[in-house]
């Protein structure tokens, strides 16, 4: 047996560097939730247990890196195309049970497929199950916070499968408020009569009015699908509206606020008349995928068990409290935030009034070990050079940070903007970088010195 460092020092080094990057900076990516690094033993993250910021994720990673990766198991529990699946069947059934339990769902009414490799494939499989090629779909536009897989295309090209294989008619947020324009959606859905309405987003800081969306869907004979990828951990914790009451199908990634491995889930109403169970299962396999990634399914099962724990509710509440603190401090500096605040784990910061781009702030923050991502804000025309930055608080909350630390993080972000606006870029960068490193490693003494 050789360790990774012995067998492949190049890859081991990359993992070590990335582990260190994750530990030593401030991760503010809205779609990342967990923190697993240990600077004292970066190349053996699966075996060490000290100084962990997030033990639950260690358990998930252990399952994810297990022997289960060796097994082929096309099909479903009890109906496989390969032998030797007696343990895998138990695992997949356990994962399905836990997925339903995590969202309080009655197994007589709801079913779930736990095999999708990612959120994107879960969405494409769900679309495949529900509608026919070239049917009309309506999802939130990308510059308005929607995801690529909800029908995104550019003026020049249909760049996503969801716009190539379906006719996409995006809905928008109201310019100015940044809130979903339900009125316009009602009008346009009446005109386009979509077969499918998709709700859910990658960058929308407010909760969803599922009841209203259901009404629009019913009026126009549309299916209603919620892609709750970003907020599924908050939904499991009961801290956001549940889409299950009103939607036909609900998809999610498992690696954002749910804190699992990278994968997807598709929940469906067991509608006998429409045979939804069979349609979804067949859309996943064989229509869109081959053999399930059983190691990942084990990681999902572990994450779902953790999501059912009362401690997870406290985590979700803290994520929201932290996002609100960031929003409050940034607003106190008169910055423009999309929707003027947040109800969930992210803040969408509009830098256009300052004449700055999100790309510039992302770059400056990167140099200072603060990881944010540039993001389109309503009215933006370029996804490459958008006018906003998305700030997510799930990862820092995994590191036990609370409101007091958020005040400091917001001060760093404010400083980054000041640096962008002033000429002293180099000196400012150095100072901010040291400051973040000191704060991130909880070296309070140096942080205080640097603060002066
Ligand atoms: N749906 C939403 C709302 C997302 O934000 C994302 C990813 O960010 C996805 C789907 C796609 O997930 P994946 O990257 O796992 O394919």
Image (spheres, rainbow, N blue to C red):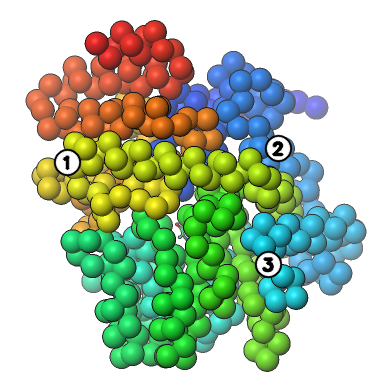
Name the quadrant of the C terminus.
top left
Dot 2 or dot 1: first in sequence order is 2
Element under disc 1: loop
**Residue topped by disc 2:** 59
Question: Image check: 373 left or right of 353?
Answer: right
Element under disc 3: loop
**Residue topped by disc 1:** 334
Residue 206 occupies which quadrant of the picture? Answer: bottom left
Q: Residue at x 65, y 48 (%)?
A: 307
Q: Residues within 10 Å of mark 3 (few under 14, many from 20)?
A: some
Residue 135 in view (yes/no)? no
Marks 1 and 3, Cα distance to the nearest angstrom?
A: 43 Å
User: Which percent across, then down, holds residue 196?
Assistant: 46, 81
Q: Residues within 10 Å of mark 2 (few under 14, many from 20)?
A: some
Q: Nearer the viewer, mark 3 or mark 2?
A: 3
Q: Residue at x 58, y 22 (%)?
A: 38
Marks 3 and 2, Cα distance to the nearest angstrom?
A: 25 Å
Element under disc 2: helix
Dot 1 or dot 3: first in sequence order is 3
CB atoms of marks 3 and 2 within 8 Å: no
Between 80 and 183, the residue placed more toward the observer is 183
Q: Residue at x 47, y 80 (%)?
A: 214
Name the quadrant of the N terminus.
top right
User: Which percent across, then down, holds residue 332?
Assistant: 21, 37
Q: Nearer the viewer, mark 2 or mark 1?
A: 1
Marks 2 and 1, Cα distance to the nearest angstrom?
A: 42 Å
**Residue topped by disc 3:** 105
Between 281 and 107, the residue placed more toward the observer is 107
Residue 76 in view (yes/no)? yes
């Amino acid at each position: 047996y050789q360790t990774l460092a012995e067998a492949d020092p190049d890859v081991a080094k990359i993992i070590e560097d990335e582990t260190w990057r994750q530990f030593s900076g401030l991760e503010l990516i809205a779609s990342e939730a967990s923190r697993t690094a240990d600077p004292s033993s970066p190349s053996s993250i699966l075996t060490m247990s000290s100084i962990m910021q997030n033990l639950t994720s260690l358990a998930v990673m252990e399952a994810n890196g297990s022997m289960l990766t060796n097994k082929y198991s096309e099909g479903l529990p009890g109906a496989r195309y390969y032998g030797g699946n007696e343990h895998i069947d138990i695992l997949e059934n356990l994962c399905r049970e836990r997925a339903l339990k995590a969202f309080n769902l009655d197994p007589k009414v709801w079913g779930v497929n736990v095999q999708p490799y990612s959120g994107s494939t879960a969405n494409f499989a769900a679309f495949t199950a529900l509608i026919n090629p070239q049917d009309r779909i309506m999802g939130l536009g990308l510059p308005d916070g929607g995801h690529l897989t909800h029908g995104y295309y550019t003026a020049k090209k249909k760049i996503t499968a969801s716009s190539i294989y379906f006719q996409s008619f995006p809905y928008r947020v109201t310019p100015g408020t940044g809130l979903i324009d339900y009125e316009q959606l009602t009008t346009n859905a009446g005109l386009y009569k979509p077969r499918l309405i998709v709700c859910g987003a990658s960058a929308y800081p407010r909760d969803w009015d599922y009841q209203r969306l259901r009404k629009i869907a019913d009026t126009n004979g549309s299916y209603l699908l919620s892609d709750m990828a970003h907020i599924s951990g908050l939904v499991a914790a009961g801290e956001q509206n549940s889409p299950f009451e009103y939607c036909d199908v609900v998809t999610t990634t498992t690696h954002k606020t749910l804190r699992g491995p990278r994968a997807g889930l598709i929940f469906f109403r067991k509608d006998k008349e429409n045979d939804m169970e069979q349609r979804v299962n067949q859309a996943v396999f064989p229509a869109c995928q081959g053999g399930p990634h059983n190691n990942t399914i084990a990681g999902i099962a572990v994450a779902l068990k953790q999501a059912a724990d009362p401690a997870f509710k406290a985590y979700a509440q803290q994520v929201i409290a932290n996002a609100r603190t960031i929003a409050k401090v940034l607003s106190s500096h008169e910055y423009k935030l999309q929707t003027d605040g947040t109800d969930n784990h992210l803040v969408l910061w509009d830098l256009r009034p300052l004449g700055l781009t999100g790309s510039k702030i992302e770059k400056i923050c990167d140099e200072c070990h603060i990881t944010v991502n540039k993001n389109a804000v309503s009215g933006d025309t370029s996804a490459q050079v958008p006018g906003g930055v998305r700030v997510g608080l799930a990862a820092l909350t995994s590191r036990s940070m609370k409101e007091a630390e958020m005040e400091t993080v917001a001060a760093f972000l404010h400083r980054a903007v000041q640096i962008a606006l002033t000429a002293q870029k180099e000196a400012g960068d150095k100072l901010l970088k040291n400051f973040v490193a000191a704060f991130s490693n909880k070296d309070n003494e140096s942080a205080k010195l640097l603060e002066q």
